[in-house]
Amino acid sequence: MSALHPTTTRFRQNSREALANRNIQAAMSHAQSGFVAKRAAARAALPEFDAIRDAARDLKNEVLRNLGTYLEAYEARVTAAGGHVHWAETAEDARRIVLEICQQAGAKRVNKGKSMISEECGINDHLAAHGITAQETDLGEYIIQLRGEMPSHIIAPAVHVTVPEVEAEFRREHSHLDAGRSLAELPDLLAEARGVLRERYFQAEVGITGANMLVAETGQSVIVTNEGNGDLSQSLGRVHIVMASLEKIVPTLEDAATVLRVLARSATGQEATVYTTFSSGPRRAGDPDGPEEYHVVLLDNGRTNMLGTEFEEMLRCIRCGACMNHCPVYQAVGGHAYGWVYPGPMGAVLTPSLIGLEEGRNLPNASTFCGRCESVCPMRIPLPGMMRAYRAREFDRGLTPGAARWGLGAWRAVASRPRLYGAVSRLANFGLKLLAWGGARLRWMPLGAGWTDHRDFAAPPLGGTFQSQWKGPR
Amino acid sequence: MAEPDAPRVALLVTCLVDMIRPAIGFASVRLLEAAGCTVHVPRQTCCGQPNWNSGDRAGAQALARTMIAAMQGYDYVVVPSGSCAATVIKDYPAILAGEPEEAAARDLAGRTHEIVSFLTDVRGVEGVEAQLSARATYHDSCSGLRSLGIKEQPRRLLASVAGLELAEMEDAEVCCGFGGTFCVKYPEISNKMVSNKAGNIAGTGADLLLAGDLGCLLNMAGKLSREGRGVSARHVVEVLAGETETPPIGEA
């Protein structure tokens, strides 16, 4: 899988493989409870949390109503500060722009802070194809880069990897280090990655980061990190490139603060991340440090097509990951099963929006509509409702599989005729009893193997349907 | 027995209760009558949730119209399922938005209640007369919990059942993996979810699983029995109504 070669059409097969993969299952069950408990504690500690969610939702709605205005204001601020804003309509445009900037800077090495937009654009592979080495500096991103994988989670990219797997990867990759060293604990791994990466910060000409927000009022880009790797990546190189999608804009610094108050709490349960960094452009005369050039690549890649549709509210997403942390489907199969850049409930809406319903139609179907994602979303995005809207589009465009369409049509025909429905339900009631051979449960049902392969089915007791037994008033 | 000015309540039986477990319907009737209601069972079919959740809006509209016609003229419509109740209460106005029946959909939505919350929140029931010697655990079905806010009401009524001890399971609010057609469209994922649930249920040491939705109960009871966990399963209204002569779900 890569951004250019999605496997979302293989979702069922991907998920079967993930369910059979012991490492993924061990890593996922370990991670889940931590995220859920930490968010719950953070929420409980801030009584006005839900009110801040409302404010965050409202301010982002205001942005989406006037997106062009805010983007132009933002661009004017960046330009006035000596930076450059590049508009990328597609991922291909973004790849070309980033490569050109790197080539003009004479770059051989690029350091990267964590950026999902760079994943969406496949930047690392593109730079590599042109002789430029991109080095991931976020610990999770570093791990999956060594493994040749994509992130399986938008804020914890290596959440599907166990500690022993990381240890094995580090021993192979860092063969210059003492073979007798201990790497059994997470802090050991963190310290080792930090030591290895520290030297590389000084070798790169260009630093690429993402942006959690872009502030229209000040022209600043904002990143939140816990390792400090983003700051080193962006301030030690000669050139800083920010890759951001255009809906990351917020009007004012005050608004940015509102979003920050729900972001970390929803993501990791922290009140704030360890580092919150505001970048205001290239180094000014008299600044002790900072990049000589500052570029912002603003990616659309299909997002403006969502404006004015029933999927517009998805553009409020601040990429906290709470929806996937609380999603029982995501927790069961992990992020790679979703087959493209964005997994979990937010991915189930964003993926078909960005790469098309034909390619992404499996994802909005793979939900029980349990509603836990919507209940924890800091931006109050109605994720299940939007998944249902994609199912409706799928149905209307004839993409729903034939057997399912037939079944729905037959059910409608029966259930819109009460007498026929009564006859059919009596028949089904009787048929289930026959199949159970007088017993209380079935271990096999015709057309029901998906159920009975894994669990029994309760047979109805004698006596017929409830409606046929009812003798009271109608 | 009901007074002459007793509210006229229509029981929306639900397809699964009608076909698989009528005892839930009779228990519902007993509880509603004990709460001073006159209970009617109009001839009825499916609320249309399978069509609505599968993207078949026209099919959902057809079944919503059928249900609206069936439920006309009653003071309340009460449902022994948070999931089917939420379809009527939360989804019907959207399903029929812009259609001639939109106002009727809103009217029905306003009269419809899930049964346990109807007893506590509308009829002011504080406790029941039932008695059952068991250690039970309660699963919060998703639609009832997150769409209708049903959490504390069943626990409050269960606390009044003599002899019943309630033990909370870990992740009681996490989906059991039923999800309507989900469980047959994605059987492996559904199996993983219900396996986790069965483990959490067994972890309480309970001998009885209770919930407010038969779909979820069939899923969990089927897994518990396949795994030989030795935990029985019943709809919560069976216990509240003292209707426990019918064997538990999937047992003879």
Image: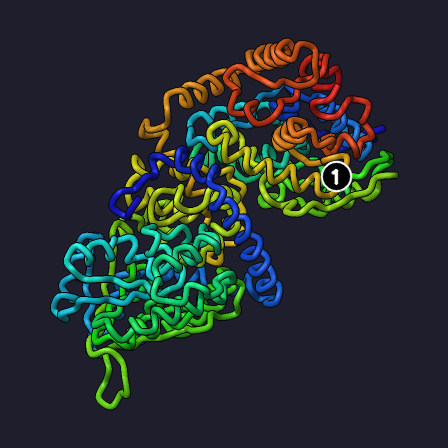
The N terminus of chain B lies in quadrant: top right
Relative horizontal placement of residue B195, taking residue A272 as reference (left or right): right
Residue nearest the observer in this picture, A364 or B102: A364
**Residue furthest out toward the bottom:** A286
Q: Quadrant of residue B219?
A: top right
Residue nearest the observer in this picture, A388 or A25: A25
Q: Position of residue A416 (x, y in %)?
A: 51, 19
Q: Amino acid at mark 1?
A: Leu
Residue A410 visible somewhere in the drawing: yes
Relative height, residue B45 to residue A292 (above, below) = above
Q: Position of residue A363 (x, y in %)?
A: 40, 39
Q: Quadrant of residue B34?
A: top right
Residue drawn at the location 76% of the way across and 41% of the way down: B205
Q: Label 1 belongs to which residue? A: B119
Q: Chain of mark 1?
A: B
Q: Position of residue A134 (x, y in %)?
A: 25, 62
Relative height, residue A441 to residue B220 (above, below) = above
Relative horizontal placement of residue A77, taking residue B226 as reference (left or right): left
Q: How is the image coloured?
A: rainbow
Residue nearest the observer in this picture, B15 or B192: B192
Q: Position of residue B2 (x, y in %)?
A: 82, 29
The C terminus of chain B lies in quadrant: top right
Relative height, residue A341 to residue A140 (above, below) = above
Residue drawn at the location 35% of the way across and 36% of the way down: A361
Number of marks drawn: 1
Helix, strand or loop for disc 1: helix
Relative horizontal placement of residue B210, taking residue A12 as reference (left or right): right
Relative horizontal placement of residue A465, taking residue A291 as reference (left or right): right
